[in-house]
Amino acid sequence: MDISQNLEKNDRKFALPVDSEHKATEFRLFSMATPHMRAFHLSWISFFSCFVSTFAAPPLLPIIRDNLDLTATDIGNAGIAAVSGAVFARIAMGTACDLFGPRLASSSLILLTAPAVFLSAIANSPAAFLMVRFFTGFSLATFVSTQFWMSSMFSPAVVGTANGLSGGWGNLGGGATQLIMPLVYSLIHSHIGSTKFTAWRIAFFIPAVFQTLSAFAIFFLGQDMPDGNYVRLEKSGEKHKDNFSQVFYHAITNYRGWILALTYGYCFGVELTIDNIIAQYFYDRFNVNLHTAGIIAASFGLANLFSRPGGGILSDVVAKRFGMRGRLWTLWVVQMIGGFLCLLLGKVGSLTASIVVMLVFSVFVQAACGLTFGVVPFVSRRYVLSPVC
Amino acid sequence: MEVPAGFLLVSLLLFSFAATGYGITFSSLPRSLVVTTSPTQGQGEEQITVTWALNQTFPAGTDSAYRTVKVKLCYAPISQKDRSWRKTEDEMKKDKTCQHKIVSRPYSASNNSFSWTIMRDIPSATYFVRAYVFNAEDHEVAFGQNTNAERATNLFEVQAITGRHASLDIASVCFSAFSIVALAGFFYMEKSKGKASQQK
């Protein structure tokens, strides 16, 4: 009885070619086949929605700052709060993925942070504004579940591509929101006729609902591993149930995790900082109007469409020839160039030069993020993602 | 010698045009209008009445180039603090002190008055009123304001609407509660799936 059941499992037909762990060895972007490609599309769309929510406020700040009487300090603090909550949330998320599986971990986090986005609509003071941005920012921890999920579904040969695309297209939300939110706002303001101070509040329902729907999609349509969900696999004995303190201990004592955390802080951390301030920078320094500043800000984040995935693909390409050493060297070179361009951006004085430098800088800094995650899946096979993010 | 004289005149005109076209600074404008508002200090009401007239102590003929007057609502220094989007710059093109237009009228030396109902999208802040005078080329040539040079007297506050409505509050809270309930539902479903596969 047992033998025939095992045979059945090994003969299971997958839409994509798989390895011995049933991880896909090929990446087919336009397929939606369960479980591999479906997991990819669910994860990047939900991560995209979290980015849209987290950075929904910056493009509407000219209205919000007048409504809530914010000072520049209030705005700066809220921006920091939006991205700092995710630091600890991501560590917790890694552990949650190890213990409950990415499907449940990510849909839970998304549903837990959706209230913060809904409640943004009724914020009434600088303090309230900071709180909603802080708690909304926790949703950026879905990045961890995205990467974890990709690492469970795709084999080493294509994991860089899968991670880069899912991460990059998620990050795209930070750029897309600079276009989406002003559009939604002006539709509500002119067509429904709400006053400015009501229209921005209604506008926040859009990212909030989108986020909630993506959580439902993950829960009902996704599965943790190629062979099934954690809960079923653990109960039937196919998957070993990990112990929290063991997982955590091994994660924090792995030096590789700490090094990558440091380098990632200086590519992704920089990317988020720029997301928060770039519109204001162009507005204040070059006196462009807010619409123009928003478009420039959007183009920084929209480069993620190809730059972060490009980093992931590049990582896989050099790995074919040079292995892990190739991945690490490429990461170093790309991040160094990104660093120099960041310095240059602060130095250039004309608007055109600034935009050009910013665009090239965005490509390099985002590619460095993609390259980082070509390395991360190899830090430890067992305790995949607890430490880094 | 018509041609050289004509040329000189044109270039003079062009030069004066260029001189007033770019880089008009606030500090170069004479304060030749007297502006008063009611209500005055400290009150927030729905209507403001603004009156303006030429300051009679200025020599006659000062207002020969005056064509239009634009009256604006301007931020007081306390509302500009730590808010670079309302900053005062001497160069008129870059100045962001006065962002709300009250009224625009053709110039006349006296008997000017306007009653303004405060618009709903004026943010909460402390304000004063300033009137700019424009010449035929639409460049600022003079101004007047209801406060002193330091912009510290006769300021008034405006209290904005919050933009919140009861329906919004309710929708917000309901959707948030729904998310949490849905999450609880997910966990319950997952647990029963786990039990079911254990029984298999």
Image (cartoon, rainbow, N blue to C red):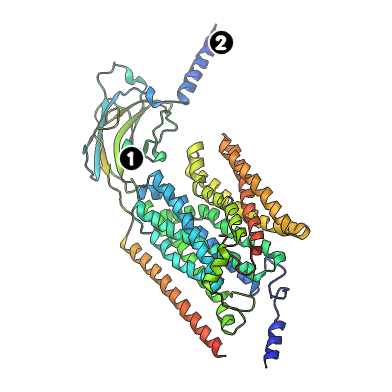
Residues at discs 1 and 2 in contact (Cβ within 8 Å): no
Q: Amino acid at mark 2?
A: Val
Where in the figure is residue B191, as x and y percent of width and height?
49, 82
Seen from the viewer's position, the closer of residues A202 and A40 is A40
* Chain name for mark 2: B
Image quarter of residue A224: bottom right
Task: Mark 1 vs mark 2: tell me if same chain.
Answer: yes
Where in the figure is residue B187, as x and y percent of width and height?
47, 77
Where in the figure is residue A203, as x and y percent of width and height?
43, 58
Q: Is residue B53 left or right of residue A385?
A: left
* Chain name for mark 1: B
- Residue under circle 1? B79
**In the rendered image of this protein, does residue B192 appear above or below residue B51?**
below
**In the rendered image of this protein, does residue A60 appear above or below residue B182?**
above
The mark nearer the N terminus, 1 or 2, is 2
Give the alpha-carbon distance from disc 1 to disc 2, as whole Å.
56 Å
Furthest residue in direction top, as rendered? B1
Q: Amino acid at mark 1?
A: Ser
Would you call the spot at circle 1 few (<14 residues within 10 Å), some (14-19), or many (20 or more)? some
SS at mark 2 in the image: helix
